[in-house]
Amino acid sequence: MSSTAAPHVLISGAGIAGLALALQLVRHGIRATVVERADAPRPGGQAVDLRGASREVAERMGLMPGIDARRVHETGMSYVDEQGRVFGRMSMEDFDGEGAVAEIEIARGDLADALLEALDEAAATAPGLVEVRYGDRITALEQHDDRVDVGFEHAAPASFDLVVGADGVHSATRRLAFGPEESYAHPLGGYAAFFTLPTPADLEPGWFALRFVPGIAFGLRPDRDPATSKAILTLRGAHDPALRGDRAAQEAFVRRALDGAGWHADTIVAAMAEASDFYFDELVRIDLDEPVNGRVALLGDAASCGSPMTDMGTATALIGAYLLAEHVVASPGELPAALARYASDIAPFVDAGKRIPGGGIKRMVPASRFDATMARLMTRVMLSKPFLPVVRRMFAAGTPDLALPAIEPGGRVAAG
């Protein structure tokens, strides 16, 4: 393909990373095709936060009006016992939006909806520059010096200047261009699950209520619609490939973990079978030396998943999409060099996004009744008024403070 023509970019995955990348490319006159294996946009998903560099990216991309219209207004996190009595609180205001709950929280599906709305607006002013194709996926990649030939499950084969895998932790693009998932995925000792359910009548409005018992930490988190909430579960468990894709086995795993757990465990179990947005997956970390191989680049969880425990996946995806788009726009005729600069610029954000607060699942989810009792006592003490300044400093020290690089035409980083 000609290096003087505007490139045509194929993006696998219509999640946060893929849509954000497509939006920035189209706004700068670069053609983008997005393929998504799901038949339609995926609603729901757990609430994600925007702070620091990810919030700055959202502001630079003009996404804040759409985000503000869809955001979840959370007061903070509360810790409850078997009867639902609160024994510790971490309010958003006490931590200036830098604690477990940020000032800006939005459901993953709602953020994707805001991006789709912005992409539709951009497409209306640039007809023919973007196609979002649902119900299709990449099945083959063949790289050449000047292009990538791509095979699809349904569409006819086509060639592209650049292919971007933004297709999640189980990325097919990564498997085709980099190698099998087992080479890059490292199990972290457990599983995550979440889904939507009707809000229990006794749930305190605005508070993300959390309970931990041996083997599981589970909570109910506010939705944008007060009538519904999100069940959020983190479960201890050994790596078991048989669980993947088997919803019946996954639900059985959750039921066993919640058996006798008190509070709203029975409510969660009862709602689980009817949930249309049930999500369950293993907690893994994706480690790649480089998110680029020739003219194939990886983005978001496909490149650097740190697991939902880091609470940084969406932030890293949004930042990565912005940086990749900026480098492609700055050097459209020198894509290999643009991709190398993207890999360099995203690296510190990837490293920060893999830091699991609190030491990982072994600290987040108690293994025994004794551990659960000690965790409750420690939480009660650390969130008491005398200790709050100490905990605030701990969160501040663990929050990445990374600046976005300024990118000039030609891919140079601006001084200062």
Image (cartoon, rainbow, N blue to C red):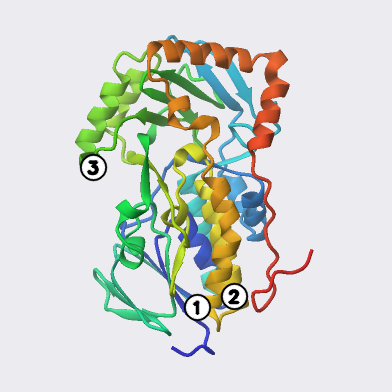
- Across and down, in percent, residue 135 comes to 29, 62
Secondary structure of residue under mark 2:
helix
Residue 241 — which label? 3
Residue at (73%, 23%) from the top-left corner? 389
In this orientation, which residue lies closer to the viewer: 144 or 112?
144
Residue at (63%, 37%) from the top-left corner? 398
Q: Is residue 47 above or below residue 23?
A: above
Secondary structure of residue under mark 1:
loop
Q: Which residue is mark 1?
A: 127
**N-terminal label among 1 and 2:** 1
Q: Which residue is mark 2?
A: 329
Quarter residue 74 falls in: top right
Residue at (28%, 79%) from the top-left corner? 157
- Amino acid, disc 2: Val
Tell me if I can see residue 105 in this picture.
yes
Camera-near label (3 vs 1) is 3
Local packing at callout 1 (Cα closer than 10 Å; few below 14, some 14-19, many 20+) is few
- Mark 3 touching mark 2, by CB under 8 A? no
In this orientation, which residue lies closer to the viewer: 361 or 409?
361
Tell me if I can see residue 229 in this picture.
no
Q: CA distance from mark 3 to mark 1?
A: 44 Å
- Amino acid, disc 3: Pro
**N-terminal label among 3 and 2:** 3
From the image, which quarter does the N terminus lie in? bottom left
User: Across the whole image, how many numbered discs are drawn on residues?
Assistant: 3
- Amino acid, disc 1: Pro
Q: CA distance from mark 1 to mark 2?
A: 19 Å
